[in-house]
Image (spheres, helix red, strand yellow):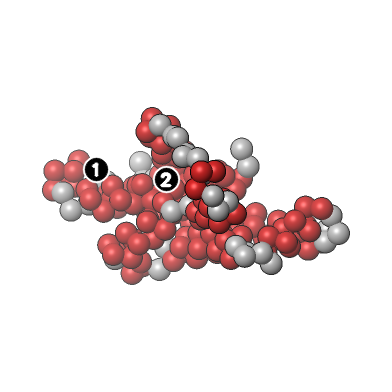
């Protein structure tokens, strides 16, 4: 598993967490039993740290690509950048980094509408979108189209794993932040 995938799992996990947080934040029953402020602070700090790691990894990759311009890998990336779906190479990365860094602003943390939009952005995967669009655009015959058959169990398992990875990082951040308060 690469660092990109691990950070993307954290972004997706934050999207799921964010939806549950927005739903349960207003509920009085959960508000008395759960420390919402501390958990949300740990979750947003985890998201910002993941965004910084993602930015550092992305920057290092681009420096490596430009330093080794004559390699096959760099040529294929430059071809993808100049192709019809070149926007997708950098749109997902820039969107994730920007959305993470927006949580440094207080009004973003407090606004339910902005948090909902950012959480939805984290749930959307540009890479799968480009793969689907590219495969449909290159094959014109409907008889050649095959249905992607994924079971609902795999989707639930995938979402659960991604959310657990984010929850484990958030738990570690929560205990690091609150270790001096005990």
Which image quarter is the N terminus in?
top right
In the rendered image, residue 169, in percent from the top left (x then y), is placed at 47, 42
Question: Which one is nearer the viewer's eye here, 71 or 61?
Answer: 71
Left/right of residue 86 with respect to residue 178 in the rendered view:
right
Left/right of residue 53 with respect to residue 179 in the rendered view:
right
Element class at badge 2 = helix
For the residue carrying disc 1, how many other residues have a C-alpha within 10 Å: few (<14), some (14-19), or many (20+)?
few
Left/right of residue 10 with respect to residue 182 in the rendered view:
right
For the residue carrying disc 2, how many other residues have a C-alpha within 10 Å: few (<14), some (14-19), or many (20+)?
many
Left/right of residue 115 with respect to residue 168 in the rendered view:
left
The residue sitting at 42% across, 45% down in the picture is 13
**CA gap, disc 2 to disc 1?**
19 Å
Q: Which mark is residue 72?
A: none
Question: Which one is nearer the viewer's eye here, 133 or 157?
Answer: 133
Which image quarter is the C terminus in?
top left
Where 98 sits versus 34, above or below? below
The residue sitting at 66% across, 64% down in the picture is 83
In the rendered image, residue 130, in percent from the top left (x then y), is placed at 54, 55
Question: Which one is nearer the viewer's eye here, 127 or 64?
Answer: 127
Question: Which one is nearer the viewer's eye here, 114 or 25?
Answer: 114
Residue 148 at least partly seen: yes
Element class at badge 1 = loop
Q: Nearer the viewer, mark 2 or mark 1?
A: 2
Q: Which residue in the structure is indicated by mark 1? A: 34
Where 170 sits versus 114, above or below? above
The picture quadrant where one finds residue 63 is bottom right
Q: Which residue in the structure is indicated by mark 2? A: 13
The picture quadrant where one finds residue 163 is top left
In the rendered image, residue 142, in percent from the top left (x then y), is placed at 49, 48
């Amino acid at each position: 598993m690469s660092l990109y995938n691990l950070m993307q799992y954290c972004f997706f996990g934050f999207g799921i967490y964010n939806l549950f947080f927005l739903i349960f934040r207003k509920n009085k029953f959960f508000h008395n039993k759960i420390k919402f402020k501390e958990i949300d602070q740990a979750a947003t700090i985890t998201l910002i740290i993941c965004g910084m790691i993602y930015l550092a990894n992305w920057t290092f990759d681009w420096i490596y690509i430009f330093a080794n311009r004559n390699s096959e890998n760099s040529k294929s990336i430059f071809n993808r950048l100049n192709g019809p779906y070149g926007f997708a190479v950098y749109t997902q990365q820039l969107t994730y980094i920007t959305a993470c860094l927006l949580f440094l602003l207080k009004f973003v943390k407090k606004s339910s509408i902005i948090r909902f939009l950012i959480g939805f952005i984290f749930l959307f995967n540009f890479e799968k979108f480009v793969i689907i669009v590219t495969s449909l655009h290159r094959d014109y015959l409907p008889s050649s189209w095959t249905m992607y058959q994924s079971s609902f169990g795999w989707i639930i398992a995938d979402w659960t794993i991604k959310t657990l990875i984010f929850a484990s990082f958030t738990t570690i951040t929560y205990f690091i932040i609150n270790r001096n308060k005990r």
